[in-house]
Amino acid sequence: MATTGTSRSAPERSGLGQWNSNVSSYYLLVGTTGLLTVIGLIMVLSSSTVTSIAEGGSPYAAFLVQAQYALMGLPVLLVAARLPVRWYKRLALPGLAVAIVLLVAVIFVGDVRNGQQNWLPLGPFSFQPSELAKLALAIWLGTVLGRKQALLGSWSHAIMPAVPGAVMVVGLVLAGGDLGTAVVIGLLVAGAFFVAGTPLSLMGLGGTIAALVVGYVFILQQGSGDRLQRIIATYGAECDASSECYQSLHGLFGLGTGGLWGVGLGGSREKWNYLPEAHNDFIFAVIGEELGLLGTVLVLSLFAVLGLAMSRVIRRHTDPFVKVATAAVGCWIVGQAFVNIGVVIGVLPVIGVPLPLVSAGGSALITTMAALGMVISFARTEPGAAKALAARGSVVRRSLAVLGGAVRRR
């Protein structure tokens, strides 16, 4: 029997190649995170130079700010990638409490930008507590749902306390008028509940209620006329190209101009103050214009690989907390990416969601890097991963020692 099992596993292993390695998730996560961050820095530089000059500043102003945030996020990612899983469980409740306090503070003392009160001033700096709330909620849901996984067949156990906590966070975000972030948090919550094994009937009810809330915010809430116009502009037969359709049309102009190969890095025309938020929410349009279809496919592929790596962590890891928290982070980052891209290509209405790791923005970049660092930490603790990484590290050290000895002998 043992011989038969060995003979069957050998071809399977050789057919899958390195994908079946114990450290594949780790290297895929590290590689895609690094590539997307580098692409983001390059495209922020390219898409912001003209507007920075027009505002009387340095052409590198936005790029230097984004690079500063990336350098701040790098040690955060490295620390998060080294934290043991037990520490994340300990930080779950305090982290959520801090996030809720900050979201409440935004309602009273927050700054209003682009019609949304979602920025909290902190001396000369300001940040978005809603970004921190995404990470805190993902960790907390992983702890709560992972601990109660065997009991989630009962509605009472599935609802308490996960649903009230999630509703509180979403409600506070909506109180600041940030519908885009609320939608992304909804995706995060749905991913966590689905992987935890929550009954589909409960998830269907929750989805229906969420759809009604989004419809109310879009259509019936006071001051939502602009949002309603965006829906009409996206799905209606006609719209005003000089107002509600302006940004979407210029995003499509950028994508269409790029063709297969693009007009070349730095050659975008839309970034010359034609396309609003060119270095932020609509940076994907500049990627399409300058790098062409191949550039957009590259970015899409990297997010797909990122999602595939996280799904691999969910499938291989034995800890329910890790499975649920990774699912929440995956639906947040990959889901937000595809929502952003859907807005740029005209499939979804404009709701102000940046492209993770690529769009300009310090709060989003640092928090996303922290979340991916956490998932990298989970990948390091997959069955067999720690031993494989230690073995590869020792091989590198021995190789460097051999090379150093050869140099000294010469």
Image: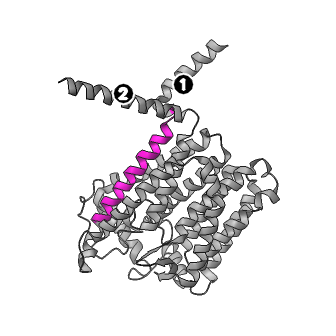
Q: Residue 215, which numbered label?
A: none
- Residue at horizontal 30 percent and vertical 62 percent from the top: 289
Horizontal side of 60 relative to 3 (left or right) equals: left
Span of residues in magenta: 20-46
Q: Position of residue 361 (x, y in %)?
A: 41, 68
Q: Position of residue 268 (x, y in %)?
A: 26, 66
Along the viewing direction, whichever of 279 and 123 lies nearer the viewer = 123
Q: Is residue 344 magenta?
A: no
Q: Which residue is mark 1?
A: 12
Which class describes the residues within 10 Å of circle 2: few (<14), some (14-19), or many (20+)? few
* Element type where label 2 sits in the image: helix
Along the viewing direction, whichever of 270 and 146 lies nearer the viewer = 146
| Amino acid tagged 1 | Glu
Q: Residue 398, which numbered label?
A: 2
Q: Earlier in the sequence, mark 1 or mark 2?
A: 1
Horizontal side of 367 relative to 95 (left or right) equals: left
| Amino acid tagged 2 | Arg
Q: Where, by quadrant of the figure, is residue 270 drawn? A: bottom left
